[in-house]
Image (cartoon, grey):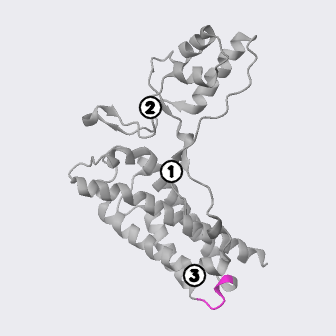
Amino acid sequence: MSSGLELKPTSEPPEIDWTDEDGAVEAMVEWFHANFEDPAQETPYESAEGGYQYIWGGPYDAAEELADAFPDADDELIARAVDEIQSDGLFDWAPAGIRIQPDDEPDDDDYRQPLEARLEALGGQLDRIEQHIAYWRNRAPQMGHNGPPDEFRLEPDDEDLTAAEASVAEVRVELAKADRANTANAEVIEKAESAFKRLANKIFGWIKAGAGALVIGIIGGAGKHIGEEIAKDPQAFWNVLTEAGSTLADWAGHLTAMF
């Protein structure tokens, strides 16, 4: 399955009436801010490594990006747009966070499987989720050393970890039922799908906000081997949560459609 994070390309530049100079400058500035942002927003920062770690490319220069995106623009108009973009004193830019997204191209083999086949695979996915939860409970005190926002931090007693763990046990009960595809408790399945989604969103946010420093092996009090191990783990956790969540969503939809 082709799941992962990827940098989406910049959005298509708008059609611009170059005779309206003020409108043209405004349109270029708006396009730039839709595609680039202050690295302080989400780019990992590590003073020991010289500052921001541009794991998604950069730093980007406004003049270069505008010239590439708007080849028909006069140099004077680009200069005006750049002056406005840099009016707050920021000259180095990172990709906008909205462009760093999961690779959401579906795996056709997975999406064409009948529900029962996906339920058969769900048990193994629940096993892996439990393993990841146990792993993160053990590693959690170190996660967040590199400064991801508080909403993406994980602690051993994190509510989203606890809810996902409880849902694993509840879904196992439903999987064990005879004619499980048709007799499972839809509320339990929907609750589990929601719990997995919340935790997956937290993992995804942490990958974006804090994993960059881990990828280069920077963890306070941990050796390089540990750093590499943790850096690889969040992506696998996110993958299995989204895989299982997709199956749960389809299962719940099937159950509610019966009534």
Name the residue carrying label 3. 120
Residue 238: percent from left, percent from top: 48, 60
The span shown in magenta is 177-181
Say few, some or many: other residues with alpha carbon within 10 Å of mark 2 (under 14 / 14 to 19 / 20 or more): some
Q: Which of marks 3 and 1 is nearer the N terminus?
A: 1
Classified by dominant secondary structure, the portion drawn in magenta counts as loop
**Along the line of sight, which residue is nearer the eye, 78 or 250?**
78
How far across and down, in percent of the image, does residue 140 sit? Answer: 33, 59
Q: Residue at x 70, y 84 (%)?
A: 182
Sequence-earlier tag: 1 or 2: 1
Neighbor class of circle 1 (other Cα within 10 Å; few <14, some 14-19, many 20+) is: some
**73 horizontally vs 96: left or right:** right
Mark pair 1, 2: CA separation: 17 Å
Q: What element carries label 3?
A: helix
Q: Residue tagged by mark 1?
A: 5
Residue 212 shows which numbered tag?
A: none
Q: Quadrant of residue 99?
A: top right
Q: Is mark 1 on a helix, strand or loop?
A: strand
| Residue at numbered disc 2 | 58
* Of residues 171 and 237, the one drawn nearer to the viewer in this rendering: 237
**Residue at 64% from the left image edge and 74% from the top image edge:** 187
